Amino acid sequence: MQYALTERIGDPTLFCGREKEMKQLMDWASGIPRLISKSKAILGRRKSGKTAIMQRLFNLLWQQNGAVIPFYFEVTDKNIWMLKFAESYFCTFLSHFFSFVHRKLLPENIAYWDWDQLFTFAKEYGNKEILRQMNVFKSYIMDKEEEHAITLAFNAPAGFSGYSGKYFVVMIDEIQYMTEYVFQDKELKIKAYNLPGAFHGLVELKHAPMLVAGSYIGWMTQMMQKMFVGCRLRHFPLSPKLDEKGGIEAVYKYAEHYDVSVTDDIAMAINNLVQSDPFYMTTLFGSPFRDFSSVEGVTQTFLKETAQDHGELFHTWMEYINISIKQVNDRYAKQILLILSKNRNKAMGRNEILNELGWSQDRDAELEEKLIPLVYGGLIQPTVSSYHYRGIPDDVLDFIFRQRYYYEIYNKPFDLQAEIKNKVKELEEKNRSLSSKVNELKGRLLEIIVWREMNQYRKQGKPLAGFEKKLRPMPAHVKKHNRLTMTHSLTIGMIYLNYYLQTPNTFALELDLLIEGISDNGYRCLVFEFKHRDEKQLPTKKEMQDFVQKIELFTNALKQQGYQDICICPIYFSAKGFRKGSEKWLHEHHIFSADLKSWGIN
């Protein structure tokens, strides 16, 4: 896979989990050519993975080279004149458009190509209307016509849809910053506070729908209510945490990336301690205090990274908290924050919060005034009613809140080390033991087990000699098939967990594990489909037929990308085996089979 846009996550393989969210977005993108996809707003707090998801969606759509052209633009928290903002927006759009149509990777570490290069690309493309639009925009810049420039820039994706016969997805990251950091005048004195409202009509276009995101949920919500009235943006909530399986996958991937050896017990301890949060994992693996030799070592690493004196997690979150709490910087607001964080796993009515504060019920209106800014700052959450609230369900934030404010409010010290050790003890008791929990998960982690093993071959540069020994017995004619014999000398290149595949007129399909080979003779790969079920729910023939269809679609997609000599070795891996007769059907279609026993997993 080519990554046209350099992803901020760094190594693309560090993108973990998110199967559900990516499947939803890929299905949404597949609906754009049918004009049925409505614009969305990703709502998630800071460090929740919004940027990673949007940039990965960009690269997936670019790679597929289909009917939908991706455009990604990030608004920064730096003051900028609206004319310069329009220029940045339009040049970024042109860069992403020409990158797609000319199949050129975008330049690394810069947002867009310079104007002369873009004009050269436009002449090569040969559309007179696009050249005219670029000349008009240039005249607006020269004449300092801010309003005209921003209007042309924002309308560009819709216009280019007509010029190119393509569809667009317009991704704007941190869109709420437009209300604070873009200025109408060169002197940066007059804010263009309602600038997102310029998208009011564009957001409803089905041939160029928008996917916007922001790190301050309350701020985003306020902006959407004022400038995108009529529910023009469908909410797409995003949790910063992965599910348990995705969390374990992330731990192993980070361990490989940082060249750190972790046992299964240690991997489980890390994942439990950070609540399957990739941002927290990144901090622990990159910590100068890292010690993953024992559960105690993991605990101490976590303690130091959340400590007030030198912890990266502490200082990262305090920046966010200080920005969010500045409107309510008084003792009672902080106390409310502590109360709701302590009770973060349940919703509290305002009457309960009043009791915790020691206030009388007639101060309900005063309490509500303090709650609203905390909600808009993303520090607490409203529930289904406007009367009940809850804290953010994040242990790390709770530790940091209490370190920062506990003594100030209650005049008592807060023992972070004791709290973290109690948390580890509770996790161990809850899971009976980390080892037993790992064993329980192994059936659900087949992808991770096989990925780790294949990654060892990749790191050592060894071919997959003897690969067929890991497969279930098969007829002689299948053993001799070139799909299998190809593996004897295959040297592994890239490995992808959850590779997304989309072709025209289909919803997004997912390849569980794709292992690409290094070859001068075309495209070589292994594709795995995993089923983790017990003996009572073995794979059906329909599911196997779906896998064969995936292989056919994947083959066609590779041909569209220009590959001629293609050899795919497909493996259907069912943990507990196969129904009677179904494996024969797989072998007849040159699909190889494996289970826990054949692979040597106890």
Image: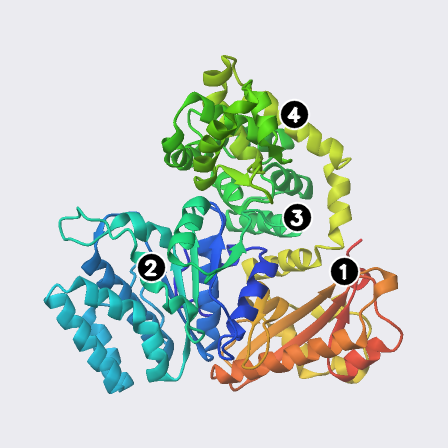
Q: Return the x and y of residue 90 as percentages of the image width and height.
A: 27, 67
Q: Secondary structure at mark 3?
A: helix
The residue lying at 60 percent from left, 41 percent from top is: 275
Q: Residue at x 67, y 69 (%)?
A: 528
Amino acid identity at mark 1? His
The answer to the question of whether label 1 and label 2 lie on touching residues, with beta carbons closer than 8 A, is no
Q: Of discs 3 and 2, which sits in the foreground?
A: 2
Q: Residue furthest front?
A: 362
> Residue tagged by mark 2?
197
Image coordinates for residue 315, horizontal then vertical, percent: 41, 32
What x and y, as percent, mark residue 108? Answer: 33, 62
Residue underneath mark 4: 422
For badge 3, the amino acid type reads Glu
Image coordinates for residue 312, horizontal then vertical, percent? 43, 34
CA gap between label 3 and label 1 equals 15 Å
Q: Tell me the SS state at disc 4.
A: helix
First reached walking from the N terminus: tag 3 or tag 4: 3
* Of the image marks 4 and 2, the number of the one nearer the N terminus: 2
Q: Quadrant of residue 184?
A: bottom left
Single out the mark in the foreground, 4 or 2: 2
Nearer to the camera, 426 or 575 = 426
Q: Amino acid at mark 2?
A: Gly
- Pick the residue in front: 194 or 575: 194
Residue under label 1: 532
- Does label 3 or label 2 sit earlier along the sequence? 2
Residue at horizontal 63%, vertical 48%?
248
Horizontal side of residue 114 vs 460, given as left or right: left
